Structure formats: structure tokens, C-alpha cells
Image (cartoon, grey):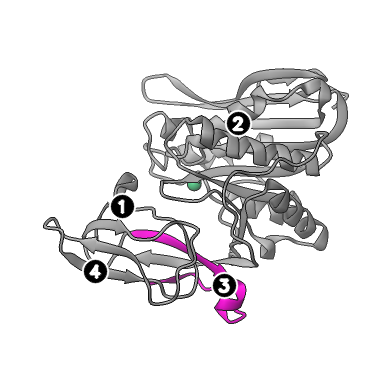
Amino acid sequence: MRSVLAVGDAKAKPGEIAKGSLGSVELADGSRAHVPVIIVNGAEDGPVLTVIAAIHGTEISGIGAIHELVKTMDPKKLRGALLAVPGGNPLAFRIGVYTTPIDGKNLSGPWYLPAVDKATANITQRMAICINAALEKADYVIDVHANPLPSIGFVLTDLEMCPDDRVKKDVVRMAKAFGLTTINWPRKQATSIRDVCSQNGKPSITHELPGNIYMWDEVNRIGARGIRNVMKELGMLEGALEKQTETVVKGDLTFYGWLIAQRGGLMCVRRKPGELIRKGETAVEIVDVYGDVIQDVKMPINGYCWSFTGGVHGSHAVSEGDHLAYIFADTKELGGAAFVEKPM
Ligand SMILES: [Zn+2]
């Protein structure tokens, strides 16, 4: 941007990169946890893209994707600006847990645009207030998440949250440019940054990386490549879109529901993520400690699993009631129903 861009305590002149903090929360011992921000301010005018990683503290691979992205960027060749938040929930990611360990709350909530009232906010919402500053500046938003292995890399949209055709069209453009499998997850209420931003006229997608607890070049590059592709699509960067190395599932795809453990035991993944599994075929078997199968978990629909998530901390030792896998399917398999969200 041809003007100084400032957010939190970071300030970048045109053609500069600045690193700082969107704000912090204070803990019992007087230490503070900062929400980091990187500003890459382009030399020319253009849109502002905000990219957030590790809203869930077990999903640090998104931080790796941001590092890889920033490393490959030259602000002098950028139109507009990138606002990157490499570590949305510092309290959670520092100890490798999903939600904020102090209050157990999920930072991926509806606490954005507008920010909640600080005086009555819990500590998770106070970190959301910091992140909200980067969302207010954004024209477009990518929220980077990740799944435990085995999983595929993909993009989630919520077209039903888009208030008009302009936002919907831009969400579709961003998802397509990213270059991975695109799955629509229509929600009835805004419950994530993707939903809230799109609802507020800031086209937004969620990127899900394959592998969550790693800082691993191969994974980092998938995210960085996808975000660069979106920046090219939005006219922020020059050049042709880069082809992703991941296998892409084609079709008009929609989230369907979960495979759910009815028995406690050890989950054996019998199929590959992103592979077509026919209705009635075994996707997972749960075995007891002796290796005997105690539940044959069959696919409820002709569809795919994007991740075999497992139990606590992604372990494949599962308790009854644990979500074993996320299912998606071609919309025509759902019989025209826009949304099912059916536990199986
Ligand atoms: Zn997540």
C-alpha cells in the first residue's frame, strides 16, 4: 500500500516488512502472552489479505505455512498488504493443546467483527479482541487450520454465509485459486472466523493442512503455495498459479458428518483420506487390545474422509463417542440436501 500500515504495535512503510504484536493477555505470574503479527506492506496499492494460523493450538503447521510464505515474498513486488498472524492462540500452542488451557474456550468462535466488550470478556475472547484488529483491516481473510494425519489438504467454504453474490463469487475464486479440494460446509449460524468474515462482506476461506503438529517443509509449502495463488488471483502478486502437489478430489463437494466410535479401543484406518469409499464399505475397524475387531465402521454414503482424526490429542486409541473421521461427499449423493451433518 502506498501508505504506512499499522496494526497493534507493528508499523510498516510501503515496501517494508514489520513484525510485532496485536496485543497481549496477562497471566497470574505477571507474564504476558502476545498475539504476533507480521505486516508485509506492498509498494503499490491493492487489497489487504489477513492470514491467521494456530487459532487452535494443536495446529501449528499453519504457522510454518506463514513463515514459508513470508520468506518468499518481496514487499516491493506486492500490491496491497499481507497481515499474517502466526500463532493466533499463544496460550494454547505453547503447550500443544487445542483450546485455551486457562478457560477451556475455543478461539474459533463468533467473537469477531465486532469485537466483544473487553470488560466482560474471558481470556480467550481477549485474544480474539487482539486478532479482531487484523480482521478489521482486511478485505479478504484466510484462516489456516490443520488435521491430524492421515488427512488431505483442502479448503472449506461456507457459501450460505455470504450476504451477496460479490462475496460468494470471491469466496469461490479464492478457493479455486488455492488449488486443493474444495468442500462447502454450510452452517446455520456463524461459528468460525470464515463464517463471521464472509457474513461481514470480507470473503473468507479456511485452509486445512494435512498434518497439524509439525513444522515440516513439505506441509508448509502446501499452505504457502495456496495463499500465494490466492494473492495472484486477487491481483496482489504477479505470475501464474502454482500447481499443488496434493491429489485433488473434483466435484461439488459438501461436508456430510462424522464416523463415530460406538466402542472404545484402537482405531485401525483401512482406507486412504481423499479416496472414494462406497456406502457400506469398511472405512475403519476398532480392535480391542488383543487385536480382535469389536466395531466395523462402515461408510454411510458414497463419499470420502478428509481426516481420520482419532481420540484425545489425535491418538488412534479411542473412547466410545469419539469422532473417528470427517466425511464429505458429492452434493448429488446427498439427494440435493444442502447440509446433513449427520453423526454415523
Ligand atoms: Zn482448527
The crowd level at tag 1 (other Cα within 10 Å; few <14, some 14-19, many 20+) is many
The residue to which callout 4 is attached is 295
Alpha carbon of mark 2 to alpha carbon of mark 3: how far? Answer: 32 Å
The crowd level at tag 3 (other Cα within 10 Å; few <14, some 14-19, many 20+) is some
The residue to which callout 3 is attached is 339
Instruction: Nearest to the eye among marks 2 and 3: give it.
Output: 2
* Image coords of residue 154 (percent x, y): 57, 51
Q: Amino acid at mark 2?
A: Ile
In the orientation shown, which residue stands out farthest toward the bottom? 335
Instruction: Nearest to the eye among marks 1 and 4: give it.
Output: 4
Query: Which quadrant of the figure has residue 234?
Result: top right
* Image coords of residue 125 (percent x, y): 52, 41
The residue to which callout 1 is attached is 311
In the image, 20 versus 288, the foreground residue is 288
Q: Look at the numbered disc 4 and say if its residue's Cβ is closer than 8 Å to ligand 1.
A: no
SS under mark 1? loop
